[in-house]
Amino acid sequence: MGYWVTKYTLGLVLKIVFRPRAWGVKNVPRRGPVILASNHLSFSDHFFGPLPVPRKVIFLAKSEYFTGRGLKGLISKAFFAGVGQIPIDRAGGAAGEQALRTGLQVLAAGRVLGIYPEGTRSPDGRLYRGKTGVARLAIESGAPVVPCAMIGTFELQPPTTIWPNFRVRPAVKFGEPLDFSRYHGQADAMLLRTVTDEIMQAIAKLSGQEYVDIDARRAKAEMAAAAGRGSGHASGAGDQRDHDPDESDDDEPGGNGAD
């Protein structure tokens, strides 16, 4: 109920103010489990991506958004629940596996699961290597993957900015569904990487983005380190906090809209 109220009220405002465009909405199946795999350029992707889809799109979000105290905590919980997010605990080594299990439960219920395979927002507008969790979800659930491309949202709301650029008209493209059900029961690392790369190439074809075959988090860390060196500040401690793309979290399903 809250999702549809939010979609029809906030969605109406977004349509009037930003006049967003959408292509290929018919490619999203009207029933049954579906994975919407999207590039991730901006916090606003969470609004403009699901907006034209006539089904509820569910994203996985870190549980902290739902456990805050006081008025701010209540507003945060209501907002993220209203835009179709469900909480997961991302602490600990089993966080990626828990996210996968939760995602599979969403798909088993015949619903639409939204996912950002890059795992975080692009730091520079390019498309980065996807995490293989999206392939695991597709193969284990048998759900079709609809590639989704956000266009213009990086310019609409670049990283570190709060207010959007009202002169930018955002858009979203939905590609034809990709079927990986033929691989059911197979989950070796090479296959997962091949399927993930196929999904990312489909997104790149829709978005027109330059594809970069490295982890987006590593790219962010390298950019931060370069900026630190340029300003004469040490950056080693910050680099150690970032995820290495070769660590075990490569098969996490992806990030949420606030990363």
Image (cartoon, rainbow, N blue to C red):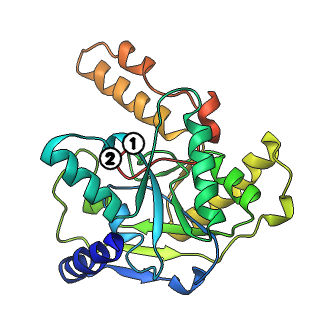
Q: Which x, y percent locates residue 34?
A: 61, 70
Residue name at image x 62 percent, y 71 percent: 110
CB atoms of marks 1 and 2 within 8 Å: yes
- SS state under label 2: helix
Q: Quadrant of the C terminus?
A: top left
Q: Which residue does the numbered mark 1 point to in the structure image?
A: 63
- Up-down: is 234 above or below 219? above
Q: Is residue 77 left or right of residue 98?
A: left
Q: Which x, y percent locates residue 61?
A: 42, 49
- Give amino acid for label 1: Ser
- Give amino acid for label 2: Phe
Tell me where residue 153 sits by quadrant.
bottom left
Q: Which residue does the numbered mark 2 point to in the structure image?
A: 66
Residue name at image x 34 percent, y 28 percent: 224
Q: Which x, y percent locates residue 234?
A: 30, 12
Count every numbered label the image shows and give the total. Answer: 2
Residue name at image x 66 percent, y 74 percent: 177
Tell me where residue 11 sits by quadrant.
bottom left
Residue name at image x 50 percent, y 28 percent: 243
Camera sees residue 248: yes
